[in-house]
Image (cartoon, helix red, strand yellow):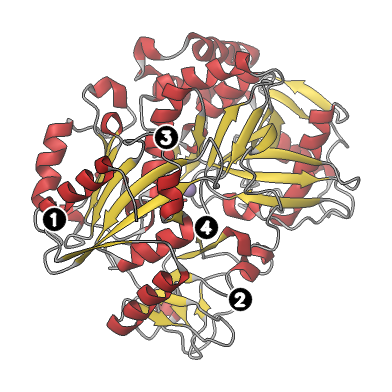
């Protein structure tokens, strides 16, 4: 493989720190993938699943203390603390390297260091970016094959000798006590040690395509977002494209491949987790998915909640931490109404229902996105797709209505900045605790969040027709704890209203929080949701909102004068509209 001298030098430096016994350059070929799989089947890193019902599917069991992203061990390492901002963990670059250097020194002794040149984004796109990561984990190499475009194609897209994000990954001893996920945006560098799991270890994903890309995007005038990309097709065949930000494990993958319950309407999948967006020469916002695969949450994925995902994972899939049936099929909670008998749990032990879930709540599938039956034919268009609407969604039992629309771009940015959500198993820590998560980017914004809001605001005037911004909450419950809205395939009804708003045909009522569907404006034909229940799902209660705004005000305080004035102003206006 021909690479630039800067890449070579960096790989040599990584090797002199970690001391592998050999270095292998990955070419991204099918043969390479198959050789890795064979090696992992031999040493027990992977187990083959039933080859008739799940051809070329494998199970990986991670270390029981390494099952989710560890945000408390994730740092932004900028020279100035304020550049990381109050919502990120920060470490001075020299201190971070000294600390992680202890864990990385000699960590690959007796092992192979794989060098993975990878491309984020489709071949031929000016928006695609290159990374070169090294790792001592075969599981990571195989996963990177699925999640990114590996090999010479990456090197070909470098715009200069040093135009790449460098990523150093080593499993270390997998102990959380010696684990660090370090981003150095000023050096275009990631160091990750002590974890082999998902977003901690597949460096193209959260570390590169979100944390470092968001930093680069700010410098270069584009956006790197924790967003799905979908195309919504109406019965006349017209497609409207949306980006949608939702926190981890909050239905983003489900919405990205939703099977429509409305006759004549369909949803095309372009991406399920990350969107890179830019303004084209005509002032149109465009988006592309930098990833090539899906690293999706398995529990609660079923033929009812996400039939396309179920079809997608029937072949060529690496499952992580799911349970297995006696015939060697993967299983997780929610896949079937009742668990099959004789399950082996995610740690390889015979499972009893009294022992808690058989699959880990953050168990995953890793698979090429093009295997999804709803994949859009143009999902790899180098020019991206034109975005007409942006959706901010979070998981809230109360307060936040099912759907409403921002008054304008700045108000939409305010709504994004105001997002809070109930935590899930995608990160270690307590599940179900409300935390602030602006634009679903709290774990992924690589710089000061106040500057991030300012960057979003500054995009507005550059757009000739700014996308409409919508806020959704599928998770609102009634007084008995029951969901007010059926969700899943029925969410297409909400998408239809959005498309009609964009076209100027859907009716809405003005409320203090924005435009809410007018009675009868949401298509509920054939759906058993009485108008009173829908009204309850769409309600915004002044008392609840004023309390929520007080909490938001506390959150904003930490940014001091760095909080952009339009955000502070919109916040004050919203309070006033509620009579506060
Ligand atoms: C993910 C996450 O894996 O957000 O996508 O945790
Ligand atoms: Mn995600």
Q: Residue 18 carries which label?
A: 1
Q: Residues within 10 Å of mark 2 (few under 14, many from 20)?
A: some
Q: Residue 336 carries which label?
A: 2
Q: Which mark is residue 293?
A: 4
Nearest to viewer (mark 2 / mark 3): 3
Q: Earlier in the sequence, mark 3 or mark 1?
A: 1
Q: How far across and how far down the image is residue 182, in percent? A: 25, 42
Q: How far across and how far down the image is residue 533, in percent? A: 77, 44
Q: Earlier in the sequence, mark 4 or mark 3?
A: 3
Viewer-nearest residue: 16 or 486: 16
Provide the secondary structure element on which disc 2 rests. loop
Q: Earlier in the sequence, mark 4 or mark 1?
A: 1
Rendered-image quadrant of the N terminus: bottom left
Q: How far across and how far down the image is residue 171, in percent? A: 22, 60
- State the residue at coordinates (38%, 13%): 562
Does the residue tagged 4 have its C-beta within 8 Å of any atom of ligand 1? no
Nearest to viewer (mark 2 / mark 4): 4
Q: Earlier in the sequence, mark 2 or mark 4?
A: 4
Q: Which mark is residue 346?
A: none
Nearest to viewer (mark 3 / mark 1): 3
Q: Which of marks 2 and 1 is nearer the N terminus?
A: 1
Alpha-carbon distance for marks 2 and 3?
Answer: 49 Å
């Amino acid at each position: 493989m021909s690479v630039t001298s800067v890449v070579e030098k960096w790989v040599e430096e990584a090797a002199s720190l970690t001391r592998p016994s050999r270095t292998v350059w990955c070419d991204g070929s099918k043969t390479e993938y198959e050789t890795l799989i064979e090696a992992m089947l031999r040493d027990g890193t992977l187990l083959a699943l039933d080859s008739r019902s799940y051809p070329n599917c494998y199970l990986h069991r991670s270390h029981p203390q390494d099952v989710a992203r560890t945000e408390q061990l994730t740092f932004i390492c900028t020279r100035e603390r304020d550049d990381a901002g109050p919502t990120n963990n920060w470490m001075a670059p020299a201190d971070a390297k000294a600390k992680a250097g202890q864990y990385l020194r000699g960590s690959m002794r007796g092992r192979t260091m794989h060098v993975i040149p990878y491309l984020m984004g489709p071949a031929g796109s000016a928006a695609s970016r290159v990374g070169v990561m090294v790792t001592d984990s075969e599981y990571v190499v195989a996963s990177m094959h699925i999640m990114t475009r590996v090999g010479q194609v990456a090197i070909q897209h470098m715009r200069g000798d040093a135009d790449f994000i460098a990523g150093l990954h080593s499993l270390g001893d997998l102990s959380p006590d010696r684990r660090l996920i370090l981003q150095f945006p000023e050096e275009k560098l990631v160091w990750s040690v002590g974890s082999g799991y998902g977003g901690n270890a597949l460096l193209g994903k959260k570390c590169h395509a979100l944390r470092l890309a968001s930093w680069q995007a700010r410098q270069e005038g584009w956006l790197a977002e924790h967003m799905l990309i979908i195309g919504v097709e109406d019965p006349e065949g017209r497609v409207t494209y949306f980006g949608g930000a939702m926190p981890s494990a909050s239905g983003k993958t489900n919405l990205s491949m939703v099977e429509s319950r409305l006759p004549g309407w369909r949803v095309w999948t372009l991406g399920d987790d990350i969107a890179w967006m830019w303004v084209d020469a005509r002032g149109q916002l465009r988006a592309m998915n930098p990833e090539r695969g899906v690293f999706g949450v398995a529990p609660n994925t079923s033929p009812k909640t996400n039939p396309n995902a179920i079809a997608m994972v029937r072949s060529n899939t690496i499952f992580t931490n799911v349970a297995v049936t006696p015939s060697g099929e993967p299983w997780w909670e929610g896949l079937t109404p009742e668990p099959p008998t004789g399950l082996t749990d995610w740690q390889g032990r015979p499972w009893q229902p009294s022992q808690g879930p058989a699959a880990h709540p953050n168990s995953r599938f890793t698979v090429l996105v093009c295997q999804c039956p709803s994949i859009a034919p143009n999902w790899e268009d180098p020019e991206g797709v034109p975005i007409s609407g942006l959706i901010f969604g979070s998981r809230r039992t109360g307060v936040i209505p099912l759907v409403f629309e921002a008054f304008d771009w700045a108000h939409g940015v305010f709504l994004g900045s105001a997002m809070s959500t109930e935590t899930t198993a995608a990160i270690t820590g307590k599940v179900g605790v409300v935390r602030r998560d602006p634009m679903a980017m709290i774990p992924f914004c690589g710089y000061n969040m106040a500057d991030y809001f300012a960057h979003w605001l500054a995009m507005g005037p550059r757009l000739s027709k700014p996308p409409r911004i919508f806020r959704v909450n599928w998770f609102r419950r009634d007084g008995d704890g029951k969901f007010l809205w059926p969700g899943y395939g029925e969410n297409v009804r909400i998408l239809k209203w959005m498309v009609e708003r964009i076209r100027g045909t859907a009716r809405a009522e003005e409320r203090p929080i924005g435009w809410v569907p007018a009675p009868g404006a949401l298509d509920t034909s054939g759906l058993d949701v009485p108008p009173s229940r829908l009204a309850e799902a769409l309600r915004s209660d002044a008392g609840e909102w004023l309390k929520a705004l007080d909490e938001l005000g506390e959150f904003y305080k930490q940014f001091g004068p760095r909080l952009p004035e339009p955000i502070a102003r919109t916040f004050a206006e919203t309070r006033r509209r509620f009579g506060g």
